[in-house]
Image (cartoon, rainbow, N blue to C red):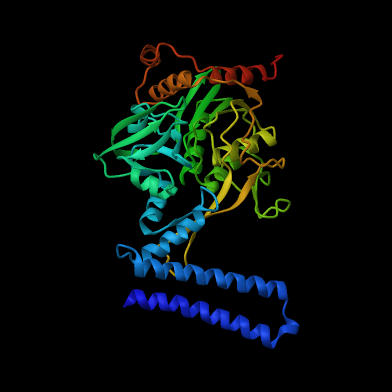
Amino acid sequence: MRRSWHSFGIMIAVGVMLGCASTRRADEAADVDVPQADAALAAYDDLAVLTEALLLVQRHYVEEVPLQKMIYGAIDGMLLGLDPNSSFLPPEPLAELEEETRGSFSGIGVTVGLEKEGVKVIAPVEDSPAFKAGIHAGDTIKAVDGVELSGTSIEEAVEAIRGDKGSEVKVTVKRADGETVDVTLVRDDIKLDSVKGVRELGDGIGYLRITQFNEHAGEDFAQAMAHLKKADVKELILDLRDNPGGLLESAVAVTEQVLERGTEIVSVRGRDAKRPQQRYEAGPCKKRFTKIPLAVLVNGNSASAAEIMAGALKAHKRAVLVGETTYGKASVQNVIKLALRPDCAVRLTTGYYYTPDDVMIHGKGIVPDVAVPVPKHVWRQVQMRRMLEERPGATRSGVTNAVNDVRDVQLERAQELLKSARVPNNG
């Protein structure tokens, strides 16, 4: 009975709108913009088609389907047809998204983006089940427990991959070279620390890595910088390699700490690409670190919010960028909760990010000032070394022996550039 009432309600609503439009057009033809009225009528006709399709499924499909499930599916299909990053978030996926931005969840430990065959791994979380099993950035997860991911939304794919700690999952992975393998993993709690590896490299050069821009990134960065300042660090290498992005607000909160107040960080432009919808500037900070020379490490897995920071620092010549061209994923997704159902939301692409020097990041990426390419197999070894170095109690001799003295040539080049830019001290 309730399903029928909802269906009838939809038809009545469309009928009332059609009736109002028809009446107005007949009685006030002289005062109505005819093309606009025709467009409105066409829209109402399309809504009527949607209603009819819902009724046909409800009446004739081989199995009974709840009306809510059909409506949610229709909304999701509409949004997914716009672009891979727009989607519908019913209660459980919305709660999971909010959990992830807080910095912890259970799963295999990968950041992914949607593509035709499944989901592409942007970056595995270090020390996670996926990382330990050899899943690399650039791999495609085609299926989970034998169920193909092709044609699913990003939320459906993530829901399939995630699960309770200790549960087993089999993922079908297509490598960049075309090889397809099945990998069995045991899910675990994934803790995402926003800042890692804070240390002094020697000769007055400090280092820190931002793994992702979660909601604590701004305060974590400030604490790390305070620690390095106590160590009398004179220059800093900021590592954004394999940083898949995160929250725009957090990227701004970190970036503004190394720029003068009022400096533009990024602008957002929508349908009108000439006029910014929003403009983000460096605001007030408890501490600013505007004098310390910076080198920023980036690679092809530095995406989204990481590209915003890198682009701003490059545009203002605040840092030298070293490494490889970034991922090029810089579209704006707003999560908008539904007024009629607040436990649901739509994630909608509403604009693109532009650097302060008027360059659109999406689809292009940020080109480094100094290109230092690293083959994928070498980068994997560098990741292992970096992970070992960042573990509590790690010793340099133990790390060196474990990874056969692998060189991080991008890091070394950044150190060279910082040293060469020093002003000579003539006494």
Residue found at x 42% / y 68%: 54
Image coordinates for residue 288, horizontal then vertical, percent: 60, 39
Side (left or right) of 297 relative to 35: left
Where residue 312 sits, quadrant-wise, is: top right
- Residue shown at 61% from the left, 16% from the top: 416
Q: Estimate the x, y position of residue 198 in percent, counting from the top left.
A: 46, 29
Q: Is residue 232 above or below residue 24?
A: above
Residue 158, x across and y down, in percent? 38, 45
Nearest the viewer among 177 and 332 is 177
Residue 246 against residue 122 in the figure, above or below = below
Near-viewer residue (178 or 408):
178
The answer to whether any part of residue 335 appears in the image is no
Q: Residue 80, position in %: x, y?
A: 50, 53
Name the image quarter holding the C terminus. Answer: top right
Question: Which residue is outermost to the bottom?
Answer: 27
Residue at (51% x, 43% y) in the render: 218
Left or right placement of residue 133 versus residue 76 in this view: left
